[in-house]
């Protein structure tokens, strides 16, 4: 599948909200590996914030948004508690947030293409590393990240236990 990547715009918010809602509905009926919940995360505000920050990207095919990802220089607070084995400033790092694929496009390598885009884009922007966290039971995402040469760093509590999400694995890829 041929995907085109571009920064999301405010005109994309309605379609992104539908993607998030469709995905959360799908997850509610199947194994909810990421532990996401409709109207909680991700939601319309997630898209608006990412677009307004200028760091939300969309993947399109045939004019339809089939995936999205947010790249920030801002880590979760728990990231400061671990040894990343590098001495980098977050201005040199993209933290990957909210990688989402529309359920109609799951198992069609869209997630892998998004990760390939993220790696290439980060290299073009002269980043030194990529970091992310993933719910410890999100086996498909963990497999994806490890297949993209991300290295496991540590497991932390991100303070989301009220949603049943106790521990998250931290991963890093040095560029």
Image: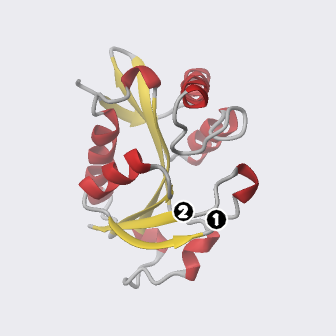
Q: Is mark 1 on a helix, strand or loop?
A: loop
Instruction: Look at 38% across and 45% down and name the residue there.
Output: 140
Residue 165: where, in percent of width, then height?
64, 55
Residue 46: where, in percent of width, then height?
64, 41
Name which quarter of the figure residue 77 lies in: bottom right
Label 2 to label 1, Cα distance in Å?
Answer: 7 Å
Is 14 left or right of 160, judged from the image as shown?
Answer: left
Is 1 left or right of 94, judged from the image as shown?
Answer: left
Instruction: Look at 45% across and 24% down and name the residue there.
Output: 103
Quadrant location of the N terminus?
Answer: top left
Instruction: Look at 55% across and 38% down and name the residue there.
Output: 32
Quadrant location of the C terminus?
Answer: bottom left
Residue position marked by numbered label 2 in the rendering:
168
Q: Is residue 127 visible?
A: yes
- Above or below, 118 against 150 in this view is above
Q: Which mark is residue 158?
A: 1
| Extreme residue toward the top, this view | 62
| Extreme residue toward the right, this view | 162
Is 18 left or right of 132, judged from the image as shown?
Answer: right
- Above or below, 131 against 38 in this view is below
Q: Which of 10 and 129 is in front in this view?
A: 129
Q: How packed is label 1: few (under 14 Cα within 10 Å), some, or many (20 or more)?
A: some
């Amino acid at each position: 599948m041929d995907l085109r990547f571009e920064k999301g715009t405010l005109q994309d918010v309605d379609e992104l909200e539908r993607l998030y809602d469709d995905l959360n509905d799908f997850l509610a009926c199947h194994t909810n590996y990421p532990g996401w919940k409709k109207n909680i995360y991700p939601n319309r505000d997630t898209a608006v914030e990412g677009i307004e920050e200028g760091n939300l990207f969309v993947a399109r095919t045939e004019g339809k948004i089939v995936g999205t990802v947010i790249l920030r220089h801002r880590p979760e607070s728990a990231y400061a508690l671990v040894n990343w084995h590098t001495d980098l400033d977050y201005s040199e790092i993209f933290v990957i947030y909210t990688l989402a694929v529309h359920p109609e496009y799951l198992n069609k390598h869209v997630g892998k293409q998004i990760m390939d885009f993220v790696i290439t884009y980060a290299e073009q922007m002269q980043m030194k590393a990529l970091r992310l966290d993933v719910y410890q039971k999100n086996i498909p995402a963990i497999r994806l990240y490890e297949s993209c040469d991300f290295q496991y760093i540590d497991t932390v509590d991100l303070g989301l236990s009220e949603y049943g999400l106790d521990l998250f694995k931290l991963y890093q890829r040095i560029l």
